[in-house]
Image (cartoon, rainbow, N blue to C red):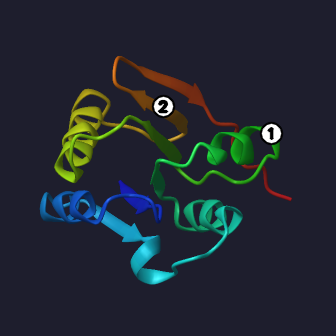
Amino acid sequence: MKFLADENFPRQALEALREAGWGVFSVAEECPGIPDEEVAALCASEQRILLTFDKDFGELIFRWGLPAGSGVVLFRITPESPEHVADVAFALLKSHPDLGGSFWVVTRDHIRVRPLKPVSGG
């Protein structure tokens, strides 16, 4: 599974995921400042799962039909530390090893999941 960390994803959490062997592309490192639409398109073209704190992706993906790539994990938590974000991501992957094809919303108390519509060929 490949991931894409949005610009708002904590750097220390990104580094912890990489140290654990996750393949994570970082918007902040590689293409800072690109619009959310380009982030979604990058996820789709590279089949990556987006890791983000940006609630706008729900509307972009579902309302406007932008490509979602392999999936989205929206963190709706107030992290105690960057390491806490990594811990939450590790726990999510451990409990749900296949995050692909879905929009995940992670809150302090629960996880919601909604299937994504497949991108149709044009």
Q: Of the numbered discs in the image, which one, if any, rests on residue 91?
A: none
What percent of the width, then of the height, locates residue 103? Answer: 55, 36
Q: Name the residue furthest left.
A: 19
Name the residue at 28% across, 42% down. Answer: 89
Q: Secondary structure at mark 2?
A: strand
What percent of the width, then of the height, locates residue 94? Answer: 21, 33
What percent of the width, then of the height, locates residue 106? Answer: 41, 30
Name the residue at 48% across, 53% down. Answer: 50
Q: Nearer the viewer, residue 53 or 119?
A: 53
Residue 27 shown left or right of residue 35 in the figure: left
Question: Quadrant where the C terminus lies?
Answer: bottom right
Residue 74 shown left or right of residue 21 in the figure: right
Q: Nearer the viewer, residue 60 or 23?
A: 60
User: Residue 102 is drawn in which quadrant?
Assistant: top right
Read off the residue under disc 1.
63
What percent of the width, then of the height, locates residue 66? Answer: 75, 52
Q: Name the residue furthest top.
A: 109
Name the residue at 22% across, 40% down. Answer: 80
Q: CA distance from mark 2 to mark 1?
A: 16 Å
Give the residue type at disc 2.
Val
**Position above or below: 9 against 80:** below
Q: How many marks?
A: 2
Read off the residue under disc 2.
105
Name the residue at 55% across, 49% down. Answer: 54
Q: Name the residue furthest bottom.
A: 30
Query: Does label 2 or label 1 sit earlier along the sequence?
Result: 1
Give the residue type at disc 1.
Arg
Question: Quadrant where the N terminus lies?
Answer: bottom left
Q: Are marks 2 and 1 in contact (CB under 8 Å)?
A: no
